[in-house]
Image: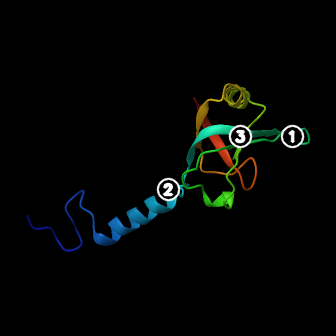
């Protein structure tokens, strides 16, 4: 079928339109941060009275930590006042007392503390 000059078949994309669409999609998509994980026994739990911060260490090797951690291997309970944060701390304490290993999955972000990855989940 022949279309007059300047008219295209309905629903067709031109190269510039497709490029503009892909660029807009790329700009609208947030940069993916790399969440890490780690399995091992809890070797240290620290709870601070000054600001409520809860951090802990595991004895296993973490997967690639996000850049915000600057190479630090400790983990942060993101919101120690929340029910989830309290449950995560309880799980860590129980695992430490029983000598059981845990697996921690991170969020890929360091929002609670500038160089400690926030915990998304704890399991054992």
Q: Nearer the viewer, residue 56 or 28?
A: 56
Q: Is residue 104 left or right of residue 3?
A: right
Decide: marks 3, 1 in contact (CB < 8 A)?
no
**How many residues crowd around disc 1 within 10 Å: few (fewer than 14), some, or many (20 or more)?**
few
Q: 87 left or right of 1?
A: right
Q: Which numbered tag is attached to residue 43?
A: 3
Q: Is residue 41 something that shows in the picture?
A: yes
Residues at marks 2 and 3 touching, judged by CB atoms closer than 8 Å: no
Q: Please, what secondary structure does the residue beneath circle 3 have? A: strand
The outermost residue toward the right is 50
- The residue wearing badge 1 is 48
Residue 122: which quarter of the image?
top right
Nearest the camera: 23 or 1?
Answer: 23
Q: Mark on residue 29?
A: 2
Residue 93 vs 3, above or below: the answer is: above
Tell me which residue sits at (50%, 62%) in the image. 27
Q: From the viewer's perspective, is residue 68 above or below residue 6? A: above
Asked if the residues shown at circle 2 and circle 1 are in contact, with their CB atoms under 8 angstroms apart, the answer is: no
Residue 80, percent across and down? 77, 34
Percent position of residue 74, x then y: 70, 48
In-front residue for pair 95/20: 95
């Amino acid at each position: 079928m022949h279309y007059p000059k300047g008219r295209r078949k309905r629903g067709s994309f031109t190269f510039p339109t497709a490029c503009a669409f892909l660029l807009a999609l790329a700009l609208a998509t947030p940069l993916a941060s790399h969440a890490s994980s780690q399995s091992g026994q809890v070797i240290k739990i620290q709870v601070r009275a000054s600001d409520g911060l809860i951090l802990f260490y595991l004895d296993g090797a973490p997967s690639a930590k996000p850049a915000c951690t600057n190479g630090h291997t400790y983990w942060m309970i993101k919101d120690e006042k929340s029910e989830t944060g309290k449950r995560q701390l309880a799980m860590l304490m129980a695992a430490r007392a029983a000598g059981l290993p845990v697996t921690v999955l991170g969020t890929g972000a360091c929002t609670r503390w500038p160089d400690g990855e926030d915990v998304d989940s704890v399991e054992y």
